Amino acid sequence: MRQLEIETLPDAPLDAAGAFMAFYLSAARTALADPATTALVILLPPAGHDHRDWRLALARDLAREAAPRRVNVLAGKPGAARAAALRFLADAPGVTGHYLMCHE
């Protein structure tokens, strides 16, 4: 399972969505174009619930575009909760198109 980690995004939801699309979407598509990539997890920093819609749309729409490869978006700081979520996703071949949030 391949990971694309985004460390910082703007605080405002529209600005964060725009920054992701402008600066990171092509990297995600490039990772998914690699024949060795069967699954991609996009790691985003924590954000308020007002970011949920664009992040869910990213996960859902990129997963549809990349099928049969899996795509999920995971938000949270590095730590035990994020590591557990990554282990879960690695062992869940049917899970794709989801936005998950980790809390320590």
Image (cartoon, helix red, strand yellow):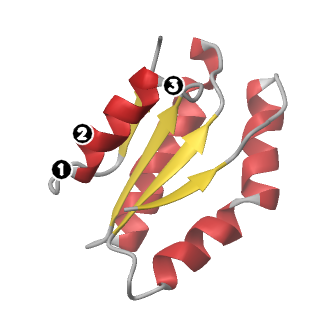
Residue type pointed to by label 3:
Gly
Q: Residues within 10 Å of mark 3 (few under 14, many from 20)?
A: few
Seen in the picture, residue 56 relative to 51 is either above or below; the reply is: below
Give the residue type at disc 1: Asp
Q: Residue furthest front?
A: 80
Q: Position of residue 29 (x, y in %)?
A: 57, 73
Rendered residue at 24%/39% (across/down): 88
Numbered label attached to residue 79: 3
Tag 2 residue? 88
Query: Mark 2, residues whose alpha carbon is within 10 Å: few (<14), some, or many (≥20)?
Result: few
Q: Which residue is mark 1?
A: 91
Label annotation for residue 71: none
Report, in whole angstroms, how far the alpha carbon at label 3 lies from the one at label 2.
14 Å
- Which sits in the foreground, 36 or 100? 36
- Residue 100 on image: x %, y %: 40, 30
Q: Relative to residue 56, is residue 34 depicted above or below?
A: below
Distance between mark 2 and mark 1 Cα atoms: 5 Å
- The mark nearer the N terminus, 3 or 2, is 3
Q: Residue drawn 63% across and 17% down? A: 50
Above or below residue 40? Residue 82 is above
The mark nearer the N terminus, 1 or 3, is 3
Front of the two marks 1 and 3: 3
Q: Secondary structure at mark 1?
A: loop
The three-letter code of the residue at mark 2 reads Phe
* Secondary structure of residue under mark 2: helix
Secondary element at image label 3: loop
